[in-house]
Amino acid sequence: MPSSNNKHHLKDYAPIVTAGVINEIEELARLLGPAKIVNVNSTKEGGGVAEILGWFIPILEDLGMTIEWKVITGNTEFFTITKKFHNALHGQPEEFTQEMFDSYLDNVGKNAPPIPDDADFVVIHDPQPVAMIAQYPNRSNSWAWRCHIDLSEADLRVWGFLRPFVERYDGAVFHLPQYTKNLMSPQFILPPAIDPLAPKNEELTDDEVTAILYRLGVPRDKRIILQVARFDRLKDPFGAIRAFKLIRNWYDCRLILAGGSATDDPESQAVLAEVQDMAGDDPDIHILNLPPDSHREINALQRAAAVVIQNSRREGFGLTVTEAMWKAKPVVGTDIGGIRHQIIHGTSGFLIHSVEGLAYRIRQLFGNPEMARRFGIQAREYVRNNLLVPHHIRRWLLVFHSLKQKGNDDLITLSPQKVTP
Amino acid sequence: MAKPFHFFTEQGIVYYSGYKADNLRSLLTGLRGVPSSSIFYHLYHSLLRRHFTTTDYMNDFAQWVWGVLWQKTLGEKLASFDPLEFTRLRDARARLIEIVDDYVGETEYFLRVSEEQAFYFLCIKSFVYPTGVSAASLPELMQAIQIISPHSLFYHLIESRLRLREPSNDLSDWLKTELDMPDLAATINVLSPYEYNLEELRNKIMAAIQDAIK
């Protein structure tokens, strides 16, 4: 998700994705008409959904839409229960009682924000407000459930409870096909996007990169291997260190593991301590525990890297991969989920299945700078054409068009003009 | 005075068909059962998604069979499948089924992959609309080709053959019938997205128009 709430206009992206692409998105919006769209989530402060809506809403307003952003309120018990829902939908073990499900429904009944009758589209984000659709049995507008969670290993009890509500929606929207469920309504695939104009992705001069790395205590005297990820076992920083030690038999280089460790997450603190312990006093391994707003620092690190790695065991989508690809870096990542979706193996990066494979592919890229350069160019073009803010806006407009059509036809002509020259 | 050529575009949103494959038999089941738009998405639209590069295997079926199932022979057969030979999706689907079915008939062992590595058959809901760009002469066409999006280029070079069920693309048809330029039409019509990516095709078309203007 774009890492900033900086408000940009769609036209600001024309130099990046071409004016032709922007014109087509504007036309798509014009053909949809001045729709009223209501978004509902659980907070306006913090979290990925609030971050997305922060840039998404101004651009849609620019395109002539009327947007309302509402939040569902609740007491501590409600958010404790929905947090457990969240964990269980991710496949983590959680205990539930019938009282918890009843309490959730009771809160939604009392605290769901009212949806205006004149709304054309209602987008409900994540599980917290999902059940509020039951309050609108006679609705005439179109509702979509935007699921930001990987449901592939969802706890059956929680999913079984939520599913009847999800089935009432006119459509559900997921990041990847692997995250879908068998539902009666259409399940749209809408990957996330990065903002090329945000501090995390904007262009930096080489001097700026050097200055930021200097401040972080990282000399630019050797090739840099970088992994950006929170300190979490699922990101396997230990495997990254093992691979680095294999590579160092051949190439003098540095490894940077950059990420954060939330203070309210004891597990991440423990992982960070273990990683630091494994790195020991090796001066070529840099463990950077960065604050959450270190966007320019991450930007500079990605630009300074010779190779970016993502050695995750599990990954939602892997926007750090997208960010690195946008900076024309060859990425070596595990062959899973969103990473596989982004890297074209042997064309824009490498997909790997082991620490040894990781080390081998990095060596290959170090030994073939021309190949690394070529991969980087391909990677940047892939992101330019698929995973930037304008594409995200375009896909949402298409979801709205689809909901409006409501039919099963897969070819729709949005013009009175005959579709021939 | 030539009738102007109006550039259209195709924008599509992807949705899950409900079919997925974890081996060759379930791939075959999917190929037989999915809506036509799924065949279109995996066979043709893949050219647009990777339009900046010519990868070894441009269609999704070949990519999965080669890269995940490690069935090299079938991967090659599927990769050599040229979707531009067909003007009907049903014919393209029938040929695909034939290729996979023949291979399945000759094979004894079927590798099954994990759910994580399964092939998800996706459909695409396509919206076609005019871009507002048009051309009535070669110089105008040159300008238009420079500014249209890859989606518009894809629509006219590749998708129009299916939509109009014509063996040639609609831009070539217009050059032939409205501008009376059969040679230029033929040059553009044989440009293959299997040999060039869409940006290279754009450059090739512009070069051909430039030659014709001279």
Image: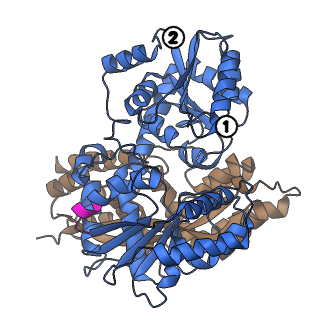
Chain colours: A blue, B brown
Expressed as whole percent of the image width and height from the top left, the position of residue A159 reads: 67, 69
Residue visible at 67% across and 13% down in the picture: A280
Residue visible at 45% across and 25% down in the picture: A301
Residue corresponding to mark 2: A222
Does the rendering let one see residue A8?
A: yes
Above or below B46: residue A6: above
Q: Residue furthest right?
A: B108
Q: Using the image as rendered, state which of residue B22 and residue B28 is in the foreground.
A: B22
Residue A100 highlighted magenta (yes or no) = no
Expressed as whole percent of the image width and height from the top left, the position of residue B84 reads: 49, 62
Residue visible at 45% across and 83% down in the picture: A406
Tell me if B98 is positioned left or right of A130 in this view: right
Mark 2 and mark 1, same subunit? yes
Expressed as whole percent of the image width and height from the top left, the position of residue A298 reads: 44, 30
Crowding at dot 1, Cα within 10 Å, few <14 / some 14-19 / many 20+, comes out as: some
Quadrant of the frame with the C terminus of chain A: bottom left
Residue corresponding to mark 1: A267
Q: Amino acid at mark 2?
A: Lys
Q: In the rendered structure, which segment of residues is drawn in magenta?
A: A60-65
